[in-house]
Image: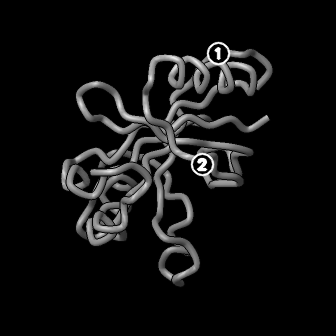
Amino acid sequence: MTDQTTRLDHIVLWVRDPIAAAGFYDKAVGLEPVRLTEYSAGEAPFPSVRVNEETILDLMPLTMAERMTMLPGAAESSGHPVNHVCLSLPADRFDALRSRLEEQSVQVTDLSYDSFGARGQARRSFYFRDPDGNVFEARHYD
């Protein structure tokens, strides 16, 4: 990636059976599974499917909903079909977004480091919520 466009990185979908869901997305939708072998071996917390070279759908086990503690109240909203939407930004826009949110008194989480996403390990990420309660993650890779 050489341009500095804000991109959609991944969407986390709640699923009852991640292996069956990966099979559906693979066979019915034509999306290539990512980390399915690792998930099956207990080495990854969830598998994903690749939308394109930049975007994946994470197939999160619904049983993990109760562990959603990155923001107060997130566990209660985790039963919805979409857990959160992740925006991938260049580092300078990542920092600017966090500053804007803080200036507007939007609660943001502490920074996380080296979390897995569509393009491998992201250097930093954080979560925030929109006015309707939708949870977003912001991250950068560079």
Secondary structure category for the residue under label 1: loop
Name which of mark 2 and mark 1 comes first in the sequence. Answer: 1
Residue type at mark 1?
Answer: Thr
Q: Secondary structure at mark 2?
A: strand
**Residue found at the far bottom of this picture:** 41
Query: Which image quadrant: the C terminus?
Result: top right
Q: Quadrant of the N terminus?
A: top right
Depth check, front residue: 11 or 99: 99
Q: Residue at x 43, y 47 (%)?
A: 57
In the rendering, which numbered label is found on residue 117?
A: 2
Left or right side of 76 for 119: right
Tag of residue 5 = 1
Answer yes or no: do the residues labelled 2 and 1 have beta carbons within 8 Å?
no
Q: Is residue 5 left or right of residue 44?
A: right
The image quarter containing residue 20 is bottom left
Percent x, y of residue 2: 80, 20
| Camera-side residue of 84 and 24 | 84
Q: Which mark is residue 71?
A: none
* Amino acid bearing label 2: Gly
Residue at 47% of width from left, 56% of height from top?
Answer: 48
Q: Is residue 60 above or below residue 5?
A: below
**Residue 5 position in % (x across, y down):** 64, 15
Q: Quadrant of residue 63?
A: bottom left
Q: Mark 1, residues whose alpha carbon is within 10 Å: few (<14), some, or many (≥20)?
A: few
Q: Is residue 112 above or below residue 129?
A: below
> Gap between marks 2 and 1, in whole Å?
17 Å
Residue at point 47%, 63% (across, down) = 47
How many neighbours does mark 2 have within 10 angstroms: few (below 14), some (14-19), or many (20 or more)?
A: many
Give left or right: position of 135 versus 102.
left
The residue nearer to you, when weighing 123 against 32, is: 123
Q: Residue at x 60, y 31 (%)?
A: 88
